Amino acid sequence: MPNERVKRLRQLMEEHRFEAILIGSEYNRRYISGFTGSSGMVLITLDKSYLLTDFRYRTQAPQQAVGFQIVEHGANPLAEVRDILLEDKLSKLAFEQDHVVYSEFTAWTKTLGGIVLEPASGLVEQLRYIKDEAELQIMQEAADLADSTFSHILKLIRPGVRETDIALEMEVYMRSHGATSSSFDTIVASGERSALPHGVASERIIGNNEFVKLDFGAYYNGYCSDLTRTVVVGTPTEKHLEIYNIVLEAQLHALEHIKPGMTGREADALTRDIITKYGYGDLFGHGTGHGLGMEIHEAPRLSKLSETILTPGMTVTVEPGIYVPGFGGVRIEDDIVITETGIKILTSSPKDLITLG
């Protein structure tokens, strides 16, 4: 698998006339090489692939980075990069401009001497837009784990329980069932706090007759899932039902109509137009969704400003919401894959309003 990714990267390098590219960012390094260590750099030329890392990974690196020449670097990895480039008679080096701070750039310039640094933006990220079958299988398993976590936690949500206790139990469940960690800080927001779009779990005690919004995911085998469901503890009021049903209508409408060839802006309108029609447009302040993969937020975006064309193999979330200050909020979110004819939904937790005692 990594060799095919290197091949695709070299095609982009040729298009940009890059002789070599240095990849040091964690997710891009893992994507290209398969190496999961905490430290290392990947150097790709038009005919060679190198993984530079330190002595801690002498055994691990060759096992994971199949097809790569493993180079054990000393105190200054860029000195090894310089020597490789000079030996291969290369005078230019592209680097990930979005992942390098200025102090690193100046130090690299000094070490590399006459080798010219060329800024490159988003080359590996561009490859990561489209998931292959192996990635999609992992993402399905991550989504399945999120679904089972939701089913598990429903048994524990009740009045008198702290939000942080619910979040901790979700974390324990995911990790004990194969996750490395959660995809992000778990959101458990009850009552008026459910109106906070990113209200991570607090010490608040869950009460009666109020929303509890759960937004969470499993970081599993290098990939993220992202699921949101909103439930009511106690008896829902007419306001609870109204808001919930509007968000559900918008989300189901989007899932039915998103398709390849559509822009992110057009996909966003599928939910936004419905919520606006009911008079809640000003209380839906974020985009309809975002790309998902090795990172919890990737390209493309489903937002009012996105002109990215949705393409088969892209994985995105669909998560409209309404947030009423002082009362509460609802978000409903699924993970989907764009297919040749429409979408495949990865998450499967129920979406009819669940009420808990």
Image (cartoon, rainbow, N blue to C red):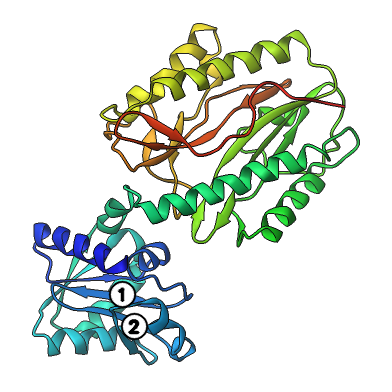
Distance of label 2 from label 1 (alpha carbons): 6 Å
Residue in view at x 60 percent, y 62 percent: 180
Q: Can you give x and y, in whole percent of width and height, for residue 218 in the image?
A: 59, 51
Instruction: Write down the residue under mark 1.
Output: 42
* In this view, 137 is above or below 79: above
The percent position of residue 220, horizontal first and vertical second, equals 55, 57
Q: Nearer the viewer, residue 198 or 243?
A: 243
Q: Quadrant of residue 46?
A: bottom left
Mark closer to the chain start, 2 or 1: 1
Mark 1 neighbour class, 10 Å CA radius: few under 14, some 14 to 19, many 20 or more: many
Compared across the picture, whether 282 is left or right of 180 comes to left
Q: Is residue 221 above or below residue 186?
A: below
| Residue linked to disc 2 | 52
Q: Quadrant of the N terminus?
A: bottom left
> Where residue 236 appears, x then y in whole percent?
79, 16
Callout 2: SS: strand
Residue 353 is labelled as none
Q: Nearer the viewer, residue 275 or 131?
A: 131
What amino acid is at disc 1?
Val
